[in-house]
Amino acid sequence: MKKINLITASFIALGLTACSSEQSVSTTALTQISAPGAPGVEPFWAYSGKTGIGTSYEQYKADHYDDSAATGKVSKVWFSIAKGMITETMFGLIHQAQIKDMQFVVVGKDFTVTENDDLDVSIDYLYKDEAGRPLSLAYKVVSKDKQGRFSLEKHIFTDPNGQTLFVRSVFNTDLEGVKAYVNVNPYIDNNGLDDFAKVTDKGLVAWQDDNFLSLQASQPFKQATVGFTGISDGLKELKMSQSLGTTYQNTGEQSGNVSLLAELGDISTNTTFDLALSFGQSEAASLKEGQASLSQGYQKLLDAYNGKGDAIGWQDYLASLEPLSTLTSSTADNGKLLYTSAMVLKAQEDKTHAGALIASLSNPWGETVSAKTGSTGYKAVWVRDFYQVAMAFMAMGDTKTAKTAFEYLEKVQVTARTPGNGGDTGWFLQKTHVDGELEWVGVQLDQTAMPIMLAWKLHQADVLSDQELTQWYGKMLKPAADFLVDGGLAKILWNDTQITPPATQQERWEEQNGYSPSTTAAVVAGLVTAADIAKKAGDTKNAVRYLETAKQYNSEIESTMFTTQGNLKSDNADGEYFIRIGQDKDPNSSTTLNANNGRDGFDKKQILDGGFLELVRYGVRDALAPSIVKTLPEYDDESLIDNLQVRYTFNFADGSGSFPGYRRYGNDGYGEDEVTGNNYAEGGNNTPGQRGRVWPFFTGERGHYEIAAANASNSLNAMKQNTIKNTYVKGMEAFANEGMMLPEQVWDGVGNNKAGYELGEGTNSATPLAWTHAEYIKLLRSLSDKHVWDHYPVVEDALK
């Protein structure tokens, strides 16, 4: 009976269309009611190598975001750009994607070209100063047809007073009979299978439960349809016949991977269409948001987004960062990446849970990762990444965000109230949603130490008062320090493990258990700073206990993690160096590390990483300590067999110079397959042949070491500073893409390059990575100050 009713309704709709004298030629398509083909093709996330991200800048009210009527609405829309297209756009919480992508389609008499096809793309910023430094995260993306038939320029930003992504599209063509369309693939509430869609007289609407998005334009759509992606979405028909023979009014009663498609109109020279992609908890609310944005118009919204006139926007945020002008002199690009990095870090904070800093506004290797169910990807909180970013906020003068971030950390510490916790408390969760929802629950002791270290830095900078420090000591810092001393049972979700510090369940790459130089550096620094805080709080007994334990852990570093019988085969290996990690206390034993990411476990003495440099950064070891100096030749050795090699030298085609880059560690499997060229985990997490690539933030870590070493030898003169700038600062700048986004990993030239990456180009792992931008800012601050920014003198003094 239901099928008969739909068919009858279709004939009625067809009759109405045929009788209307107002219909244009392009709307004489057969109009059906419900689209067939549910649920559509399998959904995947978008390409993760973003060339731009954006959101509106919002001010704190006290230490939080306030969208009450009295203070004005807080815009909670984030967008990303990849390969010239608008990709995952979030609304609500920062991880809640609402679309996979939004692309334009150009149709001529004998061609149909989508933005997903191979176009020549460039990206720039709409608002810059006279030196070319970006002043807001508003973008201009220009896409040109390779055959010269048309060009498309997009201006992309959000409405700072509403829940709308605003897009201006400007088309140019010399051909006649060319039309423009827009296509949106909704992934409402962070998944691609449970959506519905329909055409209304105001625009296109998609929804899941009480989450809605709408697509509206400044001019009425000439034609509109909805359908199931890959089956009845209209794109296939456009590509085959350059027209829509059939349109659909809704997607019926079955949800799925839906698609919105609308004809904007004919295009010629400078043909402009303004679009609003808007969000709300009801259809009416979503449509109202879009109508409000469109009625204000392009220039008013852009000015408010930028912060012109009385509006508070991105340029006001940058102006509030007093150190920026000084730090610019330490850059090699006159501050362009610095200004971008400052905004990128602030943009990756949630606006419901103030201070919640995520790792990246991306889903790694997204286009081969299923979106059938929700996924945060890197749009989540890791306390280690979080610490790096908070310290960068301090370095660039944003103490408000750094303090708010510190206070947020209480949400992700394990307490008796943590859902499902049946073990001990005080440690910090491995990975959580920004609202504190549990996701990964491994114990990483550096993540438990870093909140203590951050508190000490905030107090030293007079950001936390004596009273506040004492309060936080009792509430959050003392439980963390106690866990670093006593360890305990981690019993939550899958985890049921006894932790005995300084051995960690997971080190900073979340893959191995045991004794790690980088983890131990943080644990020792955390306990020394905890002792200093405890003393200030009047807890003398625990101050002594924390310091004594720190000294004990410190005394065992070389005896447990520095091998004197190394077996690396190279001209530079003398058998004496820090290992990456060991699962026993004998660094000369031949125990095998765990297999991971498709790589078999190796003798621990063959695996190097840069974690030993953290001992210097935090003040646990002098830069010229014998164990540190002895490890550098192996760490820098480019004659090691490729699988065990860590350092790679990059000579960029533009002649910018020669710069060092480093992998996480030898035998790393977290990256593209070197045999097939496939994405990581395309065939499963443990596919043989996967290979971790170079991570640009290690270039910054090595630059920090060079500053510390020069200070230790009293050689940090102007010439040495210039060398560091032109090697490590400029090297990080060279790894940024055209939109000045810094990646997690870059292509290092090894293996099957199926994706066609250029040497040093960010791969599809995750861009922008907050940690990389943070490391760049901290390196600039360290070079400007002539000492390492996140060094802890109290640690150095206590361990003498």
Image (spheres, rainbow, N blue to C red):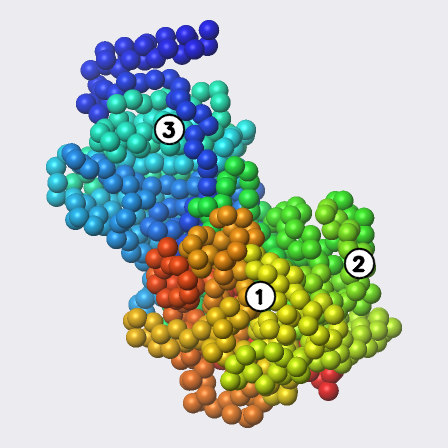
State whether residue 679 appears in this view. yes
What x and y, as percent, mark residue 226?
37, 27
Residue 467, compared with residue 117, is above or below; it is: below
Q: Nearer the viewer, mark 1 or mark 2?
A: 2
- Between the residue at mark 1 and the residue at mark 2, the CA separation in whole angstroms equals 28 Å
* Amino acid found under the numbered disc labelled 3: Ile
Crowdedness near tag 2: few (<14), some (14–19) or many (≥20) residues, C-alpha within 10 Å? some
- Which corner quadrant of the image does residue 537 belong to? bottom right
What x and y, as percent, mark residue 770?
51, 61
Residue 474, compared with residue 520, is above or below; it is: above
Is 406 left or right of 152, judged from the image as shown? right
Residue that carries the numbered disc 2 in the rendered image: 498
* Amino acid found under the numbered disc labelled 2: Gln
Is 379 left or right of 271, judged from the image as shown? right
- Between the residue at mark 1 and the residue at mark 3, the CA separation in whole angstroms equals 45 Å
Is 354 left or right of 7, judged from the image as shown? right
Residue that carries the numbered disc 3 in the rendered image: 231
Residue in the picture at 40% in, 22% down: 36
SS category of the residue bearing label 2: strand
Residue in the picture at 25% in, 47% down: 152
Q: Are marks 1 and 3 in contact (CB under 8 Å)?
A: no
Quarter of the figure that contains the C terminus: bottom right
Q: Earlier in the sequence, mark 1 or mark 2?
A: 1
- Between the residue at mark 2 and the residue at mark 3, the CA separation in whole angstroms equals 52 Å
